[in-house]
Amino acid sequence: MNELKKIPFSPPYIDESVEREVLESLRSGWITTGPKVRALETEISKLAGVSHSLCVNSATSGMMLALHWYGVRPGDEVIIPAYTYVATALVVQHLGAIPVIVDIQDDFNIDTEKIREAISPKTKVIIPVDFGGWPCDYEAIQKVVEEKRELFKPDNETQEKLGRVLIMADSAHSIGAEYKGQPCGSLADLTVFSLHAVKNVTSAEGGNIAINMPEPFKSEEIYATMRLWSLNGQTKDAFTKSQGGSWRYDIVYPGFKINMPDVCAAIALAQIRQYKDRLWPERKRVFDEYTSLFENEDWAQLPPFKQGATESSYHLFALRLIPRNSELRDKVIQQAAEVGIALNVHFIPLPELSIFKEKGYQLSDYPMAKDQFEGVITLPIYPQLTNEDCQRIFETIKQVVTESHNVAIN
Ligand SMILES: Cc1ncc(COP(=O)(O)O)c(C=O)c1O
């Protein structure tokens, strides 16, 4: 019997250009932060529509650095959605602040009305998450922040200068996506991308902070500060110090050590150079193929992907079962695994995780997050996936769902 082809969930895209960039870095005599990181920052800034962006070693550490830069501290509140990866909450907790978890809408993204209800005089930051690459409604979020401006209580110079709650987008999924014709990166005050191994553009592990603070902030100054703080607060990076006669340095801030190595940046650099022309269109092809396969099935609800000039990065294809049925969801994933197809669930909502349950959070208090979770199955989506693979995935899912419906009827 023929072995069925295995379909992994999210293998990295490694072509000759990636190998070439990495080899060049390895052979250059310099593998940690240096010219490749700088070149990657330039490419990401271009894609994100900002003048400056800083590479770090993960989105998690990028978000922590950004919150720390804004002076978030114990007792402050940060509003986040229930439907996200835990990093969005942990970065808040690591600074001693309180994540205020609110429910989502049918498009998986944070519910603006819930933000309105949750904003208090302790709120310092809102972290919208662009689920699956679909941008949040940034105009609506900005409107709420403006409306609640008088509640804001700054307690440092930076906060005073902004005079309102900071919007820091968790755009771990949405590099290259657009909201009303504007690229992710230019929609919030600060935007953090993930370059983790399963993301649209990857450096194995990595993150990037796109800087878009309004006047009178100066992006190049914020970049310089954050860069210093990402390198122990050391006045010279290792690359500069390694040039002859340049050994003397000072530590001017108790910073973090979260810089991105060049050898990692090389992977992402080769990918991002072909992102708009090849990688993004290929993800879109897979997404469109799924859409055409599932759209006529009355048990399938499709994820959002395009509305006017708002368009996804096509990071995830989050299919939802109608009606929601977590047992059937699990059965589909299990039976697909048995024929070599890796499906997934994004996400287990925060209130369902032990660390939040122990604090008394209950999923039933987040009805939309609960509803999505009970029916969601995320499908593989990457350039290497063929339309035939999509067809096989569709047929496998359809078979399990149809069998289960037939059992229910008989
Ligand atoms: C929504 C979201 N935020 C943050 C992260 C953290 O990204 P990183 O692994 O780069 O720290 C992830 C990673 O999967 C994510 O999905």
Image: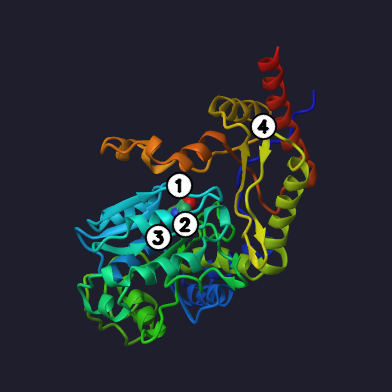
Q: Could you tell me which secondary element the residue under label 4 belongs to?
A: loop
Rendered residue at 63%/34% (across/down): 322
Q: Earlier in the sequence, mark 1 or mark 2?
A: 1
Which quadrant is the N terminus positioned in? top right
Disc 1 designates what residue?
A: 83
Q: Residue 372, how many percent across, how many down?
A: 53, 40
Mark 4 → mark 1, Cα distance in angstroms: 28 Å
**Closer to viewer: mark 4 or mark 1:** 1
**Does 68 appear above or below 45?**
above
Q: Could you tell me which secondary element the residue under label 2 belongs to?
A: loop
Rendered residue at 72%/51% (across/down): 286
Q: What kind of residue is marked 4?
A: Gly
Q: Quadrant of residue 410?
A: top right
Disc 2 designates what residue?
A: 129
Q: Is residue 285 left or right of residue 8?
A: right
Q: Are marks 2 and 3 in contact (CB under 8 Å)?
A: yes
Disc 2 C-beta below 8 A from ligand 1: yes
Q: Earlier in the sequence, mark 3 or mark 4?
A: 3
Q: Residue 270, how many percent across, how many down?
A: 62, 67
Q: Earlier in the sequence, mark 4 or mark 1?
A: 1
Mark 3 → mark 1, Cα distance in angstroms: 12 Å
Disc 4 designates what residue?
A: 340
Q: Looking at this view, is 265 or 282 the one in front?
A: 282
**Does 43 appear above or below 325?**
below
Q: Earlier in the sequence, mark 3 or mark 1?
A: 1
Q: Are marks 3 and 1 in contact (CB under 8 Å)?
A: no
Mark 3 → mark 4, Cα distance in angstroms: 36 Å
| Residue 257 shows in the view | no
**Does 173 appear above or below 396?**
below
Disc 3 designates what residue?
A: 127
